[in-house]
């Protein structure tokens, strides 16, 4: 292959890496804003997070953005590895396309390694959350338990009596809570008040008509993953503390990757300006510290907070 073709393809790769990288930075901001809701406690916090997850899964525009995100992750990773291999094979070409500053930077030399660690993190992260949300048959529904008081009369003495029956309600997408099961006061056995299909669809037992749709309880899945007791009674991960520490390590790696990648993307796109470049570099540094730090605090807060 001639040098010029290699050079061109290197430049094209860097261009696409810059575009996909900056798009993934936007994804990180959106994802972080959604995840910050995990700081809110109680039923309100749980509700807000599960409503957000439902919106992300059902809004058509967000769905398209999700597919763009998956493709960007793949493209960015594959292009990055190819570029690293290409640079290693042809060192003089590497110096032709990169400037001296980025070549001397330790971050630049380690970008492929850092990126690969982040890629492994994303895959395992998606197996733990995204795959559960979409495919796990044991995914809990967002429900709350309450005790209903039933007034009656003692048949022997005629005295008024109060019986407490535990009832489970599901939060519906209309914002109300629908009764889904209760303990029968006569038999003391749990009975379903409605039929539940596909984890979240509520059907009237008699008419078989759909009467509402509930939310998956992703909030409980996240809490359980980081070892916390949760309202959905999702099985708690015994390695929750280790998971939180691993997330911290992954976020430190992400921080280093962004530290070089953010401003380098603007360079690859040919955006250089006497006045704006220092501001972009400064913004990149702040972004690279603040975004991963906030991501890292979430599991630590859930686990140890
Ligand atoms: C504390 C940190 C984080 C938490 C608690 C968290 C939580 C979650 C949850 C619950 C989902 C599933 C959402 C759904 O399927 O509706 C998800 C999806 C995802 N996460 Fe994270 N996340 C964290 C950090 C990150 C980071 C740092 C990255 C990237 C470097 C990342 C990349 C992704 C991706 C690519 C998806 C799939 C998104 C989609 O389907 O559109 N996450 N995350």
Image: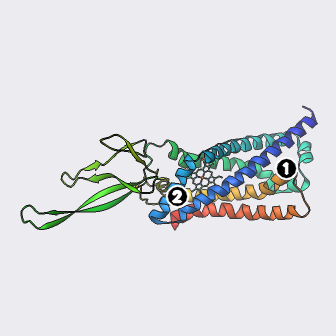
Residue 26 occupies which quadrant of the picture? Answer: bottom right
Q: Which mark is residue 188?
A: none
Left or right: 154 in relation to 135 = left
Q: List x then y, in percent, for residue 47.
A: 48, 59
The secondary structure type at the circle numbered 1 is helix
Q: Is mark 2 within 8 Å of ligand 1?
A: no
Question: Which residue is located at x 78 percent, y 48 percent?
Answer: 19
In this image, 231 relative to 52: left or right?
left
The percent position of residue 288, horizontal first and vertical second, equals 73, 61
Q: Which residue is mark 1?
A: 268
Q: Count the marks.
A: 2
Quick one: label 2, few (<14), some, or many (20+) residues within 10 Å? many
Mark toward the start of the polypeptide (2 vs 1): 2
Towards the viewer: 228 or 238: 228
Provide the residue designation for mark 2.
Answer: 49
Q: Secondary structure at mark 2?
A: helix
Q: Nearer the viewer, residue 23 or 103?
A: 23
Q: How is the image coloured?
A: rainbow
Q: Nearer the viewer, residue 3 or 230?
A: 230
Q: Is residue 232 above or below residue 4?
A: below
Residue at (68, 61) in percent of width and height:
291
Front: mark 2 or 1: 2
Q: Is mark 1 within 8 Å of ligand 1?
A: no
Q: Position of residue 292 (x, y in %)?
A: 67, 60
Would you say 59 lies left or right of 41 here?
right
Q: Quadrant of the N terminus?
A: top right
């Amino acid at each position: 292959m001639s040098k010029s073709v290699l050079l061109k393809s290197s430049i094209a790769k860097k261009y696409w890496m810059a575009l996909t990288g900056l798009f993934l930075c936007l994804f990180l901001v959106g994802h972080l804003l959604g995840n910050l809701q995990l700081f809110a406690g109680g039923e309100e916090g749980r509700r807000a997070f599960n409503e957000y997850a439902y919106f992300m899964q059902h809004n058509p525009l967000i769905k398209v953005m999700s597919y763009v995100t998956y493709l960007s992750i793949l493209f960015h990773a594959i292009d990055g590895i190819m570029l690293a291999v290409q640079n290693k094979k042809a060192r003089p070409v590497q110096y032709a396309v990169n400037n001296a500053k980025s070549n001397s930077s330790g971050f630049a030399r380690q970008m492929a390694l850092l990126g690969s660690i982040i890629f492994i993190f994303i895959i395992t992260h998606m197996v733990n959350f995204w795959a559960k949300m979409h495919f796990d048959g044991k995914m809990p529904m967002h429900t709350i338990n309450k005790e209903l008081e039933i007034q009656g009369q003692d048949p022997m003495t005629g005295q008024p009596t109060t019986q407490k029956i535990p009832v489970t309600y599901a939060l519906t997408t209309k914002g109300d809570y629908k009764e889904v099961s209760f303990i029968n006061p006569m038999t003391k056995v749990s009975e379903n008040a409605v039929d539940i299909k596909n984890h979240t669809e509520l059907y009237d037992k008699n008419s078989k008509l759909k009467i509402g749709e509930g939310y998956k309880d992703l909030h409980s899945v996240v809490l359980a993953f980081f070892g916390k007791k949760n309202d959905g009674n999702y099985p708690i991960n015994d390695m929750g503390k280790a998971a939180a520490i691993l997330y911290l390590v992954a976020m430190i790696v992400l921080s280093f990757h962004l530290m070089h990648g953010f401003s380098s993307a603007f360079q690859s796109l040919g955006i250089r300006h006497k006045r704006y470049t220092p501001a972009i570099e400064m913004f990149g540094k702040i972004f690279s510290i603040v975004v991963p730090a906030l991501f890292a605090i979430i599991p630590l807060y859930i686990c140890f907070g």
